[in-house]
Image (cartoon, rainbow, N blue to C red):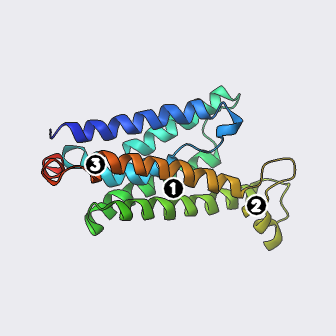
Amino acid sequence: MSRFYPSLIWALVILAIIYRVVASQYPALSNTSPTMALCFGGGFLLLGKSKGLWWIPALLVLASDILIGMLNGGGGIGGYTMMTITIFCAAAWLGQRASSWTGRIWPAMWCGVLISSLFFYLAANTYAWAVFPGYAKSLTGWWQSQTTGLPGFPPSWLFLRNAIIGDTIWCVIAGLAFFWKPADVRETATA
């Protein structure tokens, strides 16, 4: 049983990365991939022999960013990708650290994921405000980047809503996979 848990979490990470790439091709699924849950939650849950591999989910998110960019006619690693991967790596590291500070309890993982999602939302929209000429370089323009976004595009707050939905679904599945196992199985899995 001790090998079941890590392989289940790795399978969940890989499936979420595949979903992320596929969802990027359908506007209705825009930003529903659980990227912060992958990073913070992956770092939080990678235990035992996998503990030193907390950074791999963030690396997989970067690889999927590059693939999504190529599928959508872009490519390469720009400033936005560098900013996001820095946040994703920090979230994965904090997730790994948080599991040792709080114990591996589901509310701690979920709260960490939600706080990380909110931070990412604020950082990503602040970056957009700083670099896109459509935003006034004022407090009003910054607020627009956080709420309504640019005219002709969906409101920015939908990005946060969709991210929280995707992250929460991933956390629930991960919780079902690990946190609600019988205690004897959970102890063997963390050994």
Callout 2, which amino acid? Ser
Residue 98 image offset from top left, x and y in percent: 33, 64
Residue at image point 37% right, 65% down:
108
Which residue lies under the disc numbered 1? 87
User: Would you identify the image quadrant in which residue 27 lies?
Assistant: top right
> Do the residues bearing badges 1 and 3 touch, measured as CB atoms within 8 Å?
no
- Please rate how many residues cluster around mark 2, counting C-alpha atoms within 10 Å: few if below 14, some from 14 to 19, many from 20: many
Callout 3, which amino acid? Phe
Viewer-side residue, 55 vs 76: 55
Describe the element under mark 1 as helix, strand or loop: helix
Q: Nearer the viewer, mark 2 or mark 1?
A: 2
Please report whichever mark, 1 or 3, sits nearer to the chain's N-terminal start: 1
Residue 177 image offset from top left, x and y in percent: 31, 45
Question: Does residue 138 show up?
Answer: no
User: Would you identify the image quadrant in which residue 32 lies?
Assistant: top right
Residue at image point 60% right, 34% down:
23
The numbered mark at residue 178 is 3
Q: CA distance from mark 1 to mark 3?
A: 26 Å
Callout 1, which amino acid? Ile
Please report whichever mark, 2 or 1, sits nearer to the chain's N-terminal start: 1
Q: Along the horizontal axis of the image, is 64 left or right of 189?
A: right
